[in-house]
Image (spheres, rainbow, N blue to C red):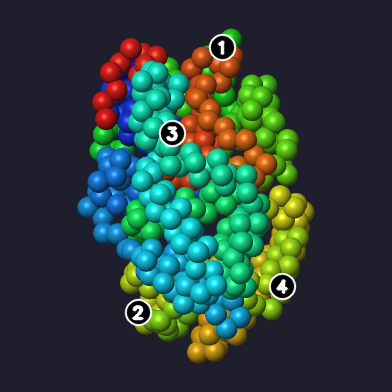
């Protein structure tokens, strides 16, 4: 029985561990924190539960290939799914633009708001309808496909390919300007962070409007723990509070994995289900970085990573008529290097156990980019200044909430503030990024096999292997890494 050591107990590491156990490998997952899940995390503060990850999950619709993958790893097995009515609602002046799940309802509400945009709205909805046929591939990776399999995959993605070709290099802000009504222009243009291609916006909304992007009940922490339970049931070993500090490389092989507190592990294979920069720069000392990654890490303008400041608030009450995610303008306040004049807040009223009885929890996510990371990195060197800045931003969000919802005045408390440095500390995340490289208009797409030239038994897996990152890519690449190991070992892969 071949031994496999997996660095990182996030979604990619758990997926790789589960599928490796199914193929007859004996695996050990090394997780630096006290619980598995990586960035798919949740935690408690003052009687409230804060969900730190899943805003919406791709493939929560039964019958889709990726849904079956989620079930096979235990993440969605027997789990109820919450289907929000809207993806987001964006307030613009006296108007509110709703991104409804029901595509016809979206069309009608937008036309009622702006009859002069009728043809543009029809075009917009037709793009989403066309993309609803797209399913994220979860089978063989491209480097294991034969010619016929590649042709079938290309044919299945023809509609998606046309949209990518037309809108993959169009900034969403430019596409938003094709609408005449100012509210539609502002709502569409602010839907995703600046720099994103319009195609990303279309894919996200198409997945939502076809009913395949919803929220698993129990939240992110329980989502990850269900996968960990499935892994342990299959005989896997999980070592928590076990941070990897180095790799012992002899010739072209990793001979050992060094961890905190003097512990070490060895195996026939090592799967790095961790941050790519942490692997290449910290564990490998920059000696084995593939050229494609080196290029992207060096060009932060074209290949930025997205991070955020997340403020969690507890409210002594419940407001029932608020959309699940609401974006509204606010008095400007500084966050990182930028002025913020609009915030998006989400409530978790669908989760009765996330707050004390009669109360509710809200989170506010503020996008942060490379220049913002520099501010937080400098602040973190002075712990008092860092904490004061977190407190200031928390209070700014609290005041913005009380201004928008006067009934909340005196009943809101800041529970926690997460910064890019939090992601860096918790997950060794490169520059605090919770996802891989942003699909900007200037970026070139990359799909990497995870093989590290010069080290025969080391594989990288996870969201850094292919765009757009996130939990689905983590789960799929974890599975595909094991498929490649089976090929190398001459073993038939069992789904």
- According to the image, label 2 marks what residue? 357
SS category of the residue bearing label 3: helix
Of tags 2 and 4, which is closer to the observer?
4
Residue 333 is marked as: 4
Residue 252 is marked as: 1
Mark before the other along the chain sequence, 2 or 3: 2
Viewer-nearest residue: 382 or 453? 453
Instruction: Residue at 53% x, 28% y: name it.
Output: 448
* Contact, mark 2 vs mark 4 (Cβ under 8 Å): no
Instruction: Residue at 39% x, 54% y: name it.
Output: 129
SS category of the residue bearing label 1: loop
Q: What residue occupies the far left of the structure in this picture? A: 78
SS category of the residue bearing label 2: loop
Q: CA distance from mark 1 to mark 4?
A: 52 Å
Mark 1 is surrounded, within 10 Å at the Cα level, by few (under 14), some (14 to 19) or many (20 or more) other residues, namely: few
Q: Is residue 139 visible?
A: yes
* Contact, mark 2 vs mark 1 (Cβ under 8 Å): no
Residue 477 is marked as: 3
Q: CA distance from mark 2 to mark 3?
A: 40 Å
């Amino acid at each position: 029985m071949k031994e496999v050591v997996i660095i990182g107990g996030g979604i990619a590491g758990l997926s790789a561990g589960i599928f490796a156990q199914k193929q007859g490998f004996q695996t050990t997952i090394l997780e630096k924190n006290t619980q598995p899940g990586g960035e798919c995390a949740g935690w408690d503060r003052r009687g409230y539960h804060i969900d730190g990850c899943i805003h919406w999950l791709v493939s929560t619709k039964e019958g889709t290939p990726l849904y079956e993958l989620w079930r096979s790893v235990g993440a969605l097995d027997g789990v109820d799914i919450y289907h929000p009515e809207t993806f987001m609602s964006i307030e613009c002046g006296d108007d509110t633009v709703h991104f409804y799940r029901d595509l016809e309802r979206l069309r009608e509400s937008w036309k009622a708001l702006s009859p002069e945009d009728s043809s543009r709205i029809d075009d917009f909805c037709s793009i989403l309808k066309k993309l609803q046929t797209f399913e994220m591939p979860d089978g063989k990776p491209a480097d294991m496909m034969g010619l016929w399999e590649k042709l079938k995959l290309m044919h299945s993605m023809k509609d998606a390919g046309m949209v990518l070709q037309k809108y993959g290099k169009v900034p969403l802000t430019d596409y938003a300007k094709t609408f005449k009504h100012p509210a539609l222009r502002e709502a569409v243009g602010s839907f995703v962070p600046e720099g994103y291609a319009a195609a990303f916006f279309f894919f996200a909304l198409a997945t939502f409007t076809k009913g395949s992007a919803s929220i698993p009940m129990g939240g992110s922490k329980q989502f990850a723990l269900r996968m960990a339970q499935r892994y342990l049931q299959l005989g896997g070993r999980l070592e928590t509070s076990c941070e990897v500090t180095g790799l012992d490389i002899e010739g072209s092989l990793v001979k050992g994995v060094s961890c905190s507190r003097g512990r070490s592990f060895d195996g026939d294979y090592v799967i790095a289900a961790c941050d790519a920069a942490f692997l290449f720069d910290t564990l490998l000392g920059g000696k084995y970085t593939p050229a494609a990654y080196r290029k992207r890490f060096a060009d932060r303008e074209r290949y930025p990573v997205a991070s955020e400041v997340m403020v969690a608030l507890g409210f002594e009450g419940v407001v029932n008529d608020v959309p699940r995610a609401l974006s509204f303008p606010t008095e400007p306040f500084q966050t990182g290097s930028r002025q913020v004049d609009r915030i998006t807040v989400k409530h978790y009223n669908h989760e009765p156990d996330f707050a004390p009885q009669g109360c509710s929890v809200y989170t506010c996510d503020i996008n942060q980019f490379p220049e913002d990371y520099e501010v937080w990195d400098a602040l973190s060197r002075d712990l008092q200044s860092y904490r004061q800045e977190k407190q200031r931003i928390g209070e700014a969000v609290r005041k913005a909430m009380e201004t928008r919802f006067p009934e909340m005045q005196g009943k809101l408390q800041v529970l926690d503030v997460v910064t890019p440095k939090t992601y860096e500390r918790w997950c060794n995340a490169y520059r605090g990024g919770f996802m891989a490289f942003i699909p900007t208009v200037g970026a070139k797409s990359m799909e990497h096999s995870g093989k590290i030239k010069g080290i025969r038994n080391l594989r990288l897996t996870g969201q850094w292997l292919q765009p757009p990152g996130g939990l689905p890519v983590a789960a799929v690449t974890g599975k595909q890494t094991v498929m490649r190991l089976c090929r190398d070992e001459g073993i038939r892969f069992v789904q």
